[in-house]
Image (cartoon, rainbow, N blue to C red):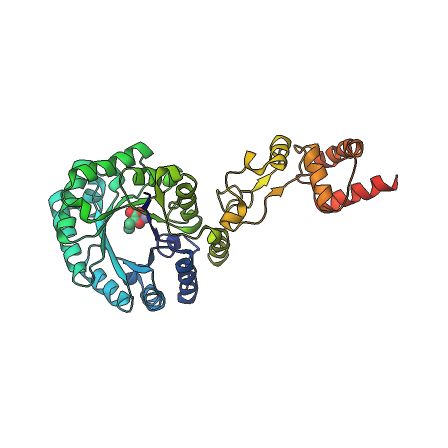
Amino acid sequence: MSEKVFIFDTTLRDGEQVPGCKLNTAEKLALALRLEELGVDILEAGFPVSSPGDFDSVNQIAKALKNTVVCGLTRAVQKDIEVAAEALKPAKRSRIHTGIGTSDLHIKYKFNSTREEIIERAIKAVSLARNFTDDVEFYAEDAGRTDNEYLARVIEAVVKAGATTLNIPDTTGYCLPYQYQAKMEYLVNNVKGIEKAVLSCHCHNDLGLATANSIAGVMGGARQIECTINGLGERAGNTALEEVVMILNQHKDLGYYTHINPTLLNPISREVSEIMRMMVQPNKAIVGANAFSHSSGIHQDGFLKEAQTYEIINPAEVGAEDSKIVLTARSGRSALAFRLHKLGYEFMRNDIDALYNQFLEVADKMKEVKDSDLKTMADNYNKK
Ligand code: KIV
Ligand code: ZN
């Protein structure tokens, strides 16, 4: 029997922290409704104490969503928690996400504090949050660089105080997948009462490992992944929602599923890109413009014989446009014949050979041969 992995979307909080990506309340609300349609389980709507605008956004989203848990971020600070609780009041299902840095670096330089004092502050924050909702998530910021033994003590204390989800962020994207998996396993095996809560992955992409680390975290015992559309987020970004969802979808052998509707992944990716004015890199997995484009002769020939030779996902499954056969100087005869056929031209093999030589001359001069170039070539050939 496969097990559910909860998808916690933080596009509107960690994603919106990207310079230039700030959204107004109407834009956030529109996106929140789309994310609910996509099937996210928990939506982190913002950081209510940070500004009146963000308070209003969280509040409007809390009023509007029907099934999704609406979450607000706080520091382990009384005012933050009270303000978040107020913003979340209208929600059918609400979650307060509170926490504090637990690595020695954070304890010394951010808080000028001690390990014992940090545990006390964490307990106080979770206990206070529990007065407002029975759904409280605790984050141990920089858990990726927090020593496991101390992290287990913090986590055990907050579970006792009532935390129901335990976020283990690799805030700086430092961990390797086997280390992040081992961290989760250590917590599963060493924290009393851990079975009462859900462990969560929150991975940043500073070394390009956010997705791999999130999957490793699930394999280590986590059952929630925190992620954003297009992998937006602080610095190099967060785990990309579309990537983890499709990994779990493709590798059913791992034994996990999510409630995300994959056919909405590409439409939502485009909407987020437009509304946040952040271009998606063309080679981005699942949602990049080239994710289903084939341009080399060897690949094109195989793909045209049987798509599965070079595609592990059918583009329709993720709401992408049909696969593309792009013509470049690296393309082969079958690709040329295919594209001519799509334009309504039928040529015999000998003609294709002759046209291919002309095609290569043109292709060597340009990055891509377009339909208009092909039409000119084919019409001139037919006139001969
Ligand atoms: O990266 C991080 O540690 C965070 C926390 C605030 C959850 O975003
Ligand atoms: Zn983060």
109 vs 76: above or below: above
The quarter of the displayed image where residue 351 is located: top right
Q: Quadrant of the N terminus?
A: top left
- 26 or 221: nearer the viewer: 221
How many discs mark residues in the rendered view?
Answer: 0
229 vs 132: above or below: above
The furthest residue to the right: 384
x then y, percent, for residue 273: 49, 54
The furthest residue to the front: 1
x then y, percent, for residue 269: 48, 52
x then y, percent, for residue 176: 32, 33
The quarter of the displayed image where residue 172 is located: top left
167 vs 303: above or below: below
Q: Is residue 243 left or right of residue 138?
A: right
The quarter of the displayed image where residue 187 is located: top left
Q: Please say whether residue 153 is visible from this viewpoint.
A: yes
x then y, percent, for residue 303: 60, 36
Q: Is residue 145 left or right of residue 313?
A: left
Q: Please say whether residue 310 is visible from this viewpoint.
A: no
For image coordinates 52% across by 51% down, the residue present is 319
Q: Is residue 114 left or right of residue 232?
A: left
Q: Quadrant of the C terminus?
A: top right
For image coordinates 22% across by 57% down, the residue present is 135
